[in-house]
């Protein structure tokens, strides 16, 4: 399947600028709600080796630094489905020059 013109534009911006914003690829509000649910329900139970926090940043009311990376996110199937979203797969393919890509099965969250 040839990349859409929107994906081609995002890929060109990524190549040119080193970053890109893909609009209307996923529902940003829904993704934020998923991340907030994960942080509320599962993050407090994660082993410290799976959670990386800012080293020199402000602390929250519990005295913990801001989370910047969470690995081994297996607790929410919704996040795995997000990684396999055909729109994201198509965008990733366009950004890699049209090659085939497959979803990441072990989703991670980065801030």
Image (cartoon, rainbow, N blue to C red):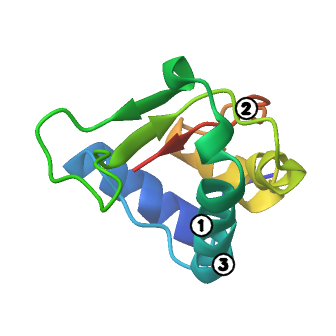
Q: Residue 104 carries which label?
A: 2
Q: Residue at x 84, y 57 (%)?
A: 78
Residue of label 3: 27
The secondary structure type at the circle numbered 2 is loop
- The residue lying furthest to the front in this view is 62
Relative height, residue 33 to residue 42 (above, below): below
Q: Nearer the viewer, mark 2 or mark 1?
A: 1
| Residue placed most toward the observer, 37 or 105 | 37
Instruction: Give the mark nearer the N terminus: 1 vs 3.
Output: 3
Q: Badge 1: few (under 14), some or many (20 or more) residues near its Cα, within 10 Å? A: few
Judge whether 39 appears above or below 74 on screen. below
In-image side of 67 versus 63 (left or right): right
Q: Mark 1 points at which residue?
A: 36
The mark closer to the camera, 1 or 3, is: 1
**Residues under labels 1 and 3: Cα distance?**
14 Å
> Closer to the N terminus: mark 2 or mark 3?
3
**Distance from Cα at disc 2 to Cα at disc 1:** 21 Å
Whether residue 64 sits left or right of residue 21 in the image: it is left
């Amino acid at each position: 399947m040839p990349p859409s013109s929107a994906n081609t534009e995002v890929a060109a911006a990524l190549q040119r600028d080193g970053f890109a914003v893909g609009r209307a690829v996923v529902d940003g509000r829904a993704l934020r709600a998923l991340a907030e649910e994960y942080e509320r329900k599962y993050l407090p139970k994660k082993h410290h080796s799976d959670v990386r926090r800012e080293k020199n940043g402000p602390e929250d009311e519990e005295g913990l630094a801001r989370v910047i990376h969470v690995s081994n996110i297996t607790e929410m199937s919704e996040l795995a489905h997000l990684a396999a979203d055909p729109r994201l797969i198509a965008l990733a393919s366009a950004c890699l020059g049209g090659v085939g890509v497959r979803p990441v099965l072990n989703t991670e969250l980065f801030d």
